[in-house]
Amino acid sequence: MPQSLLKAAKNTEDGSLELSVVIPMRNEEGNVLPIVNEVNTELAQLEHFEIICVDDGSDDNTENELRQAKVNFPKLRIIQHMQPCGQSTATRTGICAAYAPWIVTLDGDGQNPPSEILNLVNAREHALEKNSKIGPLMIAGQRETRMDDLFRRFCSIGANGLRSLVLGDGIRDTGCSLKLFRRDTFLDLPYFDHMHRFLPALVQRAGGHVITVDVKHRPRANGLTKYGLMNRLWTGIVDLIGVLWLMRRAKQPNINELD
């Protein structure tokens, strides 16, 4: 990661929430302007936020639409991968570049409604009111109703069921990209390709807490999904075995500092 992108998270003097919205994109022509506009509209009540779109080596009109969006939305930052590196790497690139201590992620296809972001923020506030020293924390969206075709829903149910059975993470829908967490929590997690599918389990491995919030899901308006059965099945099985290995070797010491 270039040092010019690895920012230091800042905090406001009044303690108000700072938020970086990280959106990985690959070939999302037609989706760029609507999603950037929606995020700006929904977060207008927040004084401190930015949007970071990571163009993961798109070969359509995504770059031009991002440049057009930046003219209208100065809080938008654009980072570009010169070649495709995958969703996990694009997400990490955006998080490394973020200035805010809190990160929210969502897909670039517009299926995660930006209106749900504040629901995650409210769940965070409620959790911190109950326990201000809660430690690593993730607020994970879970789609109430998948607005995908029957085949994708069938694959997702099977993958989520297998993952939950093997890892015991208690998460119904880890594939939902709508998540809120601290930047330093994410950067402390072990990094590997496709890690975005296992973020709740990895946070739990670090001794953290995952709170789930039911969120809405929308049909894709433009473009095509990047995932199919064959490019997820075998890599998913290998990744699951790797994450199980990581989970079983995690240690959470009970630390006491002597005077």
Image: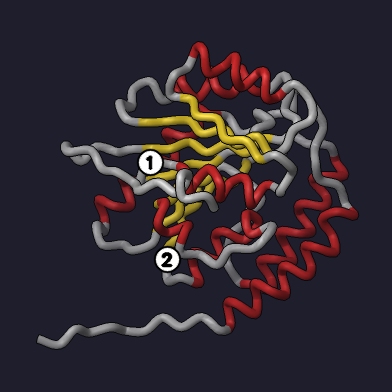
Which residue: 74% across, 21% down? 61
Image: 198 above or below 176: below
Amino acid type, label 1: Tyr
Residue bearing mark 2: 208
Amino acid type, label 2: Gly
Which residue: 72% across, 67% down? 239
Residue 221 image point, x, y percent: 74, 22
Local crowd at mark 1 within 10 Å, few (<14), some, or many (≥20)?
many
Count the numbered circles shown.
2
Residue 105 image point, x, y percent: 53, 42
Image: 39 above or below 159: above
Which residue: 67% across, 47% down? 87
Residue bearing mark 1: 99
Which of the 4 image quarters holds residue 57? top right
Q: Furthest residue to the top?
A: 72
Which corner quadrant holds the C terminus?
bottom left
Q: Secondary structure at mark 1?
A: loop
Which residue: 62% across, 54% down? 196
Residue 175 image point, x, y percent: 66, 50
Image: 210 above or below 167: above
